[in-house]
Image (cartoon, rainbow, N blue to C red):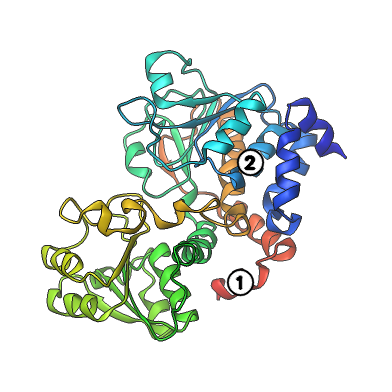
Amino acid sequence: MYLLFVFATFGGMLFDDIINDHYEPREYPALAYLADRWIAEQPFLGMKILVATPIFRNTLLQYRSLMAGGAQLYVGHAVSSDGKTPVMPCDENVIGILEEDGIPVVTDADVKSGTVDDDFDLILDCAGQFSFCHPKFGFVELTRSGVQFFEKSTFPVYVADSGIVKRIETILGTGDGYFRGLEQLGYGDFENKKLIVFGSGKVGCGIALQGVGRGMQVTTVTDTRRRSSSSDFCHVLERNNVNIIDFLDDAEVCKAIRESQFLVTATGKKAALSVLSVDAVNSYSDLVVANMGVEDEFGEYVPKNRVLNKKAPLNFMLEEPTHLKYIDTSLALHASLGERLLLDCQKAGGKPFVGPMDPPAEMEQSLIMVTIQNGAIGAEVCEMMR
């Protein structure tokens, strides 16, 4: 009852119609929890907040929660040098819905040119699209790839991807999105097929485990010297009978490429493949090749038409790149860290810290418990956390 009253006040009835038509409450327990609390507490009342989360239908839930907390919402995305083409994939239909609902959609070019004032109180960024701005309180960055833009920042920056919550999205959700992308393109017979995954971080691990679950023989190519790193999941992969090859072993890597039917990159690095690996990819025409990283991980010597979705992350060809049930906790953490940053600044009487900072463990645990207890993926999250 309260939700409908507040969102009608903010012109958000279109949000409710779309959300109710496409989602069940068990798919967004964490964002619903925040909205219910923020309606009463109004932590963002009167604040100008820019949100640069990739613009798709499922991000309407994050926008709605922030508006419930009193935010004067702006939705942002970066564009290329032509001033029009989005740098990050987005859903133009959702942009139209936002504009119809009276929510400003701005680009980085708008802010740089002065068309839109650089006077935001808080920026919930993604991939550092608006890292050049000067928010009154600071930033919350959603992704690990965006941290590089804030390393020397003079503002407080919470990084949502530095904790454990993001594993729900990347291990469970992104792996699922890769295979949904393949299925949409007509690839559906995975049993006993061979898959080679470049990268053993959260995304690579998620794809590999999804492949195992579909009966595939999976090989992961990675830097085995990083096995002790907290961002490496080789130990999980080996427990699930995934073959591990060191990325420096060109002979074994090329052999695995030639024997595979599917190849996907998820290293998080631009032009990550070696020269010999690139040659193998280009020469093996039956290999189904995809990228699941933000960067072009194949490099200039692999043509765009050789890679599904023209080298853009394969799941971004979908209407919903990551199912809401998998991204709900990440979006909730992204927004919650904004509230936490405001409280930190208030207590400190200014900047509590500068540069990137990990999310508080107790905040992550609270949101994970909400997801486990009230969400559709509680059992999957428990299994992942083992």
| Type of amino acid at the residue the image marks with label 1 | Glu
Q: Quadrant of residue 62?
A: top right
**Tag 1 residue:** 380
Numbered label attached to residue 351: none
Residue 119 visible:
yes
Element on which disc 2 rests: helix
Q: Is residue 224 left or right of residue 123?
A: left
Q: Is residue 57 left or right of residue 107?
A: right
Mark 2 surroundings within 10 Å by alpha-carbon count, few (fewer than 14), some (14 through 19), many (20 or more): some
Element on which disc 1 rests: helix
Q: Quadrant of the C terminus?
A: bottom right
The one nearer the camera, 5 or 163, is 5
| Type of amino acid at the residue the image marks with label 2 | Leu
> Which residue corresponds to the image point at 71% horizontal and 55% vertical from the top-left?
29
Numbered label attached to residue 60: 2
Q: Is tag 1's residue or tag 2's residue first in the polypeptide sequence?
A: 2
